[in-house]
Amino acid sequence: MLVALVGSGIGPSLSPALHEREAERAGLPYRYRRIDLDEWGLPPEAVGDVVAVTRDAGYRGLNITHPCKQEVLAHLDGLSADAEALGAVNTVVFTDGRAVGHNTDWSGFTRGLAEGMPGVRLDSVVLLGAGGAGAAVAHGLLTQGAGTVRIFDLDRHRGEDLEASLAARFGGGRATAGHGDDQLARAVHAADGLVHATPTGMAAHPGLPLPADLLRPDLWVADVVYRPLDTELVTTAAAAGCRVLDGGRMAVFQAAEAFRLFTGTEPDTGRMLRHFDVLARDPGQESDVR
């Protein structure tokens, strides 16, 4: 079984090792490759060519990451209900010559939040980022009963588009797009929690996605970035007394569902979490986890 990750700047991704080690433990012939658009000098729009070439080459499927989760939609033959609702795809499965898009990010996030920070208040949540990951997080939060989600994105129109999409599914007022530093400060001040879903904090995009002085001890903070696990946001929020959740659990749970879609085999998520802990400490380390 041949699968690949498609995106930009994906060299540090742990997905290949995480998938391959679970497949090895399950006794499956499985290879997971990287197709880094940056290394090939290709724009996000080239994801359509990647889909076509890998389908013709006999791949079982693809994982799709930044910045192609929405760009890939136009190049697929069908969508799962979740992917269609979200307007974002992170998993493509090739079946009978057709490329079908799925979204495992939203369920990966909600399960990670439930297990990593059980019992947090969801009356009001601020979401940073309205791209593919942000759309999945917002869907997950509202599905889990969040009262309101306040969306902030540097692209004002993208935030407003996500607001409209969520209103169609969850009703008006459940999600609203905000703009500017002043609105962000007021929203964070009134929020129970903050979820970060942009590339800021990744190895290639270091930094904080918001001013550090907006963080306060009674605010919980979740980051979807997992390379590195201890992003500047996670470490700064922890130092401010916030309850924090790194992106590790979301990475594992979305990967587990993608693995099931690719292989038809139910993965051992507990074992995958243990694999991830080993890989996050040292990506080159051999794991004897069973």
Image (cartoon, rainbow, N blue to C red):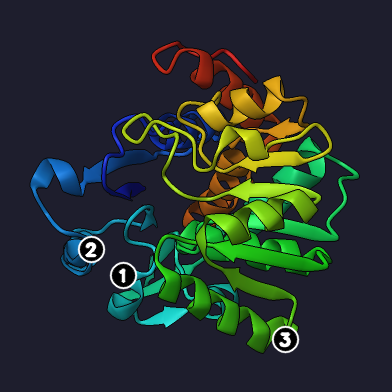
- What element does badge 1 sit on? helix
Binning the other alpha carbons within 10 Å of mark 3 as few (below 14), some (14 to 19) or many (20 upward) gives: few
Q: Secondary structure at mark 2?
A: helix
Which residue in the structure is indicated by mark 3? 172
What is the three-letter code of the residue carrying label 1?
Glu
Vertical arrangement, residue 204 with respect to residue 280, above or below: below
Q: Earlier in the sequence, mark 1 or mark 3?
A: 1
**Foreground disc of the pair 2, 3:** 3
Residue 247 horizontal side relative to residue 144, left or right: left
How far apart are the two marked residues, 2 and 3, measured between alpha carbons? 34 Å
Structural crowding at the residue carrying mark 1, measured as other residues with C-alpha within 10 Å and reported as few (<14), some (14–19) or many (≥20): some
Name the residue beneath numbered marker 2: 47
Residue 71: mark:
1
Give the quadrant of the C terminus.
top right
> Residue drawn 36% across and 48% down?
1
Q: Residue furthest right?
A: 119
Do residues under tags 1 and 2 come within 8 Å of each other at their CB atoms? yes
- Residue at image coords 66%, 41%: 222
Give the label on residue 227, or none: none
Residue 43: tell me if it is visible.
yes
